[in-house]
Image (cartoon, coloured by chain):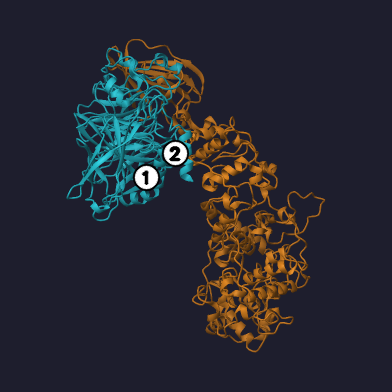
Chain colours: A orange, B cyan
Amino acid sequence: MKCWPLFAASAFFCGQLKAHPLQAEPINHAYVFNFDQFYLDQDPDEHVVNGGFLLLAELNCTACHAAPESWQERLKAKPGPNLGGVGSRLDADTLWLMIRSPQHRKKGTQMPGLFAGEAGDEEKVEALVEYLSAMKWDAPQMPAGDVERGKELYHKVGCVACHEPALDVRPPKVPADAEVEKPGNGSVPIALADAYDVNALALFLHDPLSMRPAGRMPDMRLSKEQAADIAAYLHVGRVAEKATARAALKIPPQGVEKGKEVFKTMNCAACHVGVEPLGDQNAPKSAKASTPTPQLASLKADRGCLAEKQASGTPRFDLNELQKRALKLALAVIQKDAAPKLTAQEKVDWQMSRLNCYACHDRDGKGGPEDPRAQFFGVNDSTAESLGQLAHLPPTLDKVGRKLTRGWFEKILWGKDGSVRPYMDTRMPNFGREQTEMMIDWLNEADVAEKPVTIDVSGLGKHHRAEAGRQLLGAKGLACVACHGLKDRKSLGPPVIRLTHTVERLQPEYFKELLLNPQATQLGTVMPPMFVGRKKADLEIESLWTYLREVEGQPLPEGLMSSEDFELKPGKEKRVIIFRSFIEGAGSHAIGVGFPSGVNAAFDAKQSRWAVIWKGRFLDAMSNWQDRAMPPIKPLGTDVKELPAATGERVFGGYKVGKDGVPTFLYRQDGQQVEDTLRPVKGGFERIITVNGKQTKEILSW
Amino acid sequence: MVVAKRLGVLQSSGALRGPGDIRKRRRAGALQNALASLFIATAALAQQQSDYYRIETYELPKGVNFEASGLAVTAEGKLAVGLRKGEVWIEGKDGFQLFASGLHEILGLAWHDGALYATQRAEVTKLRDTDGDGKADEYLTASTGWGVSGAYHEYAYGPVFDAQGNAYTSLNCSMGKAWKGAGDESTHPLWRGWVVRATPDGKLEPWCAGFRSPCGIGQDADGEIFITDQQGNWMPTTPLFHIRKGAYFSHADSIPDAMRPESPVKIAAKQPDGITVAEAMKTVQGYTPPAVWLPYVKMGQSGTGIVCDKSGGKFGPFEKQLFLGEFVLSGVNRVFLEKVGGEFQGACFPFVDGLQCAALALTTLPDGSLVVGESNRGWNSKGNRPFGLQRLVWTKKMPLEVQKMELLKEGFRFTFTLPIDKASMGELTGQSYTYPFQSKYGGEELDAKPLIIHSIQISDDGLTMDVLCNVLRTGYVHEFELPKLKAKDGTPLWHRMAYYTLNRLK
């Protein structure tokens, strides 16, 4: 993956040194990951202007400064943190520091400072603190976390794609004597972890979208235990900062009502949600504030947060010079022109930038984790190592719009069970439906194939028998099972994606495109071009599709299948199993009887006689249960003994099953009614024959 | 694009394969066009279908390959399901309960005289629970004695019982390799391609012959037995046969057994190959044509289970008509029968499609719904689930359909389920064609000619329409495409195609 040029902002080391190893170098400007990643001082204006658009949207400028209509969709603000219950998550001192001076309390925050210390500001801040402190919730109790497990998880599940890796953690593959390369790009700060109580932090990590609906911190699909472990790790050694300045001010209580009023007049609800009814996201934002904010179109490029020296009373973002330049460029365009119509690919790129999909994914050569971060992504299955970075890094998104079905996009983007790479430690996070749903159509449009591939998936062709596909997949066919597992079975080799959900997951045309030319279709794939030169490739691919479509209830391909799958096991089930089939030694009217003690027999219902007895394993039901043709089966065990032919004229009548599950066979022999039962005894069977009510017994031992 | 693709497949898979040596072939182009319009119409039909019939999918026991290949209803009205893997499940309060297991490929299930009867490869077995624990403890032989060589195609279906308690089983002809382990039967399995019956005391009697793969066996409201067979050698498309003792239905593999002294079938030892069905009706000794042909692709590709609607109107306006499962297209077709010259003949109509899997077995429940047992193991079907169980429930909304299609001296009388609006009358077209009588696999429509329609008379009440046309031909299917008729209440005609098999003139 790419290694982006060193982060060139004016970072400097200051403030208190904290004990936590995750403390990245502080960032002294409102941090937007993808801005810092993709825009540099030396870049030309025509590139930097796009960074300005990104900042306008990501810093929520448009939440207060309405954009001209043609720009509104693109520059739409994101919902800010949900403040419901914030009084239970953050103590009053932290709230005070965060409101009074956000850039001081949380370096790199995107929250603007609204209070420069003018008259009345201290009272307003205090009032807001009171108001927000009163917002309590009943937090559910999370399990106790484990710091070591949390440390391991934090580094391997993908947190470090955006956040800082710890100095004391060595990626698994870095030799002991080599220096661990540090990320070149800045890290998203984790600066409030010390102020949250550990339970609230665990809750946040378990379900970040409920507190931060914008999805910029996505839901990593952590279990409660995992969330608690990471929370414990992030919390270790942290000491919450005391607001000494607040104590010194000795501002008297202002009352919650005043706080509510300030919240309204300062237009906090333009960004924050969860403080109903003020946080109504659907209402026009600027209208709510007591003093309407000017529209984007009328802003001056040398005023407010863009001014060289910012006047007090204007929101303070601590923008750096590059950010100011970008914003000015963007404002100039917006004030001059209507928004250009973006192509589908441009829209995809825009949303991927906003959500920072590029932190993990590469698409058309852009993005992907830089090597110092990528080296932490792990695998949990050593057989996956042979796949190289395919095994531990999230997949490239080239052509994904024609690859995945809508249903699967939904599972991946905001649903569940979309993961097909269990060997990979990292996981695709949930960014929230609101943030991602629109991308499906854009991707579909952006990735339309230039030369459409056609495939017949009607299932009506002669070659559309699932069995034909099964044989191709099998070890004696194209041996797809060498790398691909299926259902609960691993492949014979590396754990490449299991084919279980292929038809739900892939668009059939892409499936064919991929099989016909894997390397051209999926850059970097290790899939061999199995169909090159195969005359019947079209038909064969359709057969594969049919099998995969009907895979539920179908036998597995050869290689993945073992006779264990359908073996009848009287011993394991602790019951007598009766099973009719074509059984070698007992003919086409055979009835097998397997006893839990490990002796078995087969009755020939045509000749009305016990035909064969054996020890050990009983029978394999696969022929009966899975095959179209039902080929004959063999006794699986040992000591197979054929019994002598029947005497007299016999007519079969059926069997009765006793309470103990043992069958008694009924037949007429030379006109007399016979009951014939085998019961296991030491060394074999006792055979009990009743003719016209008269019972005789014999021992069959062998 | 989809249509074009499908057509391509159908062509390459042999659906349009012609006999070559027989007369006029229909131009492939014409059939393609017919098929194209057929597929395009499907979407609109689906919407109408759900207005009239609701498809309900049963919840099935987890972890069981519920290949529902035999259906029966117990005296208590409970649904019993035979599975291809050899189990019988009965619907109880908490879903299906296992009743019997270990049987050899159940392809039919019946309730008769207080017991369930399951047809296995080699036997019809009477299953009873004598101790009331909900599990069968008696597996008694009710019918056996036909040959089983182990060849893959030796399926057995049934049973159905007549009023005297005789059990009828239909047997596939033997295809593929026999198994040496089957002993004598590996050289000649008896009565393959026959229907056999067992008397109540267990005596097996050969009954009628000439079947290929008689997958559906069922009865009309009067207990007459009908059979569906599968397209292949000697079967140009799915037929619906009315079976009688000694009748012969064209598949030559059963001829050798007809030469046995105990055979009730009296036919010649050799039959012509490569004539038409219409000719065979005149020249082949003992040949009984099907009461109805279901034209290939147009009406599906593989007829299966048969059930008669005896619900007294609870299933809609088709009382006493037959419903036929359709494997490949995963649906159900409808058949109207009448007796002409003492023999059954009649028409078939598309009914319901879009099931989740191949329809294999049909039955009706006391509430008037129609249950479809599904499994497509080993073959392909449009419904892509490998197995399942669904039922069709009439929504009580009356569709406009051709309820009956009866033969007149010079044409046909269509009777509708609702009075039609004469103003909606438009162009009505028809053609007739026959099929080959041949050992080659399948066969296309032969000697097709348009019907010259010279009079259309709609009755004052709008319920019947007499269509007089030239030329009616015996041994031919008479196919009609009705105009986009509307009922007086505006309901559009649901299905516009009707196919009448004319064996005898009035």
Q: Residue furthest top?
A: A648
Location of residue B284 (image quadrant):
top left
Chain letter of the residue beneath label 2 in the structure image: B
Q: CA distance from mark 2 to mark 1?
A: 14 Å
Give the residue at x 67% y 51%.
A393
Q: Where residue B159 sits in the image (x, y, percent)?
A: 29, 29
In this rendering, would A127 be left or right of A693?
right
Residue A63 vs A600, above or below: the answer is below
User: Which residue bears the numbered disc 1?
Assistant: B58
For badge 2, the amino acid type reads Pro
User: Which-is-in-front pick, marks 2 and 1?
Assistant: 2
Query: How many residues crowd around disc 1 within 10 Å: few (fewer than 14), some, or many (20 or more)?
Result: few
Q: Residue furthest bottom?
A: A119
Location of residue B413 (image quadrant):
top left
Disc number at residue A352? none
Residue A644 vs B461, above or below: the answer is above
Disc number at residue B386? 2
For badge 1, the amino acid type reads Tyr
User: Can residue A57 be seen at all in this image of the molecule?
Assistant: yes
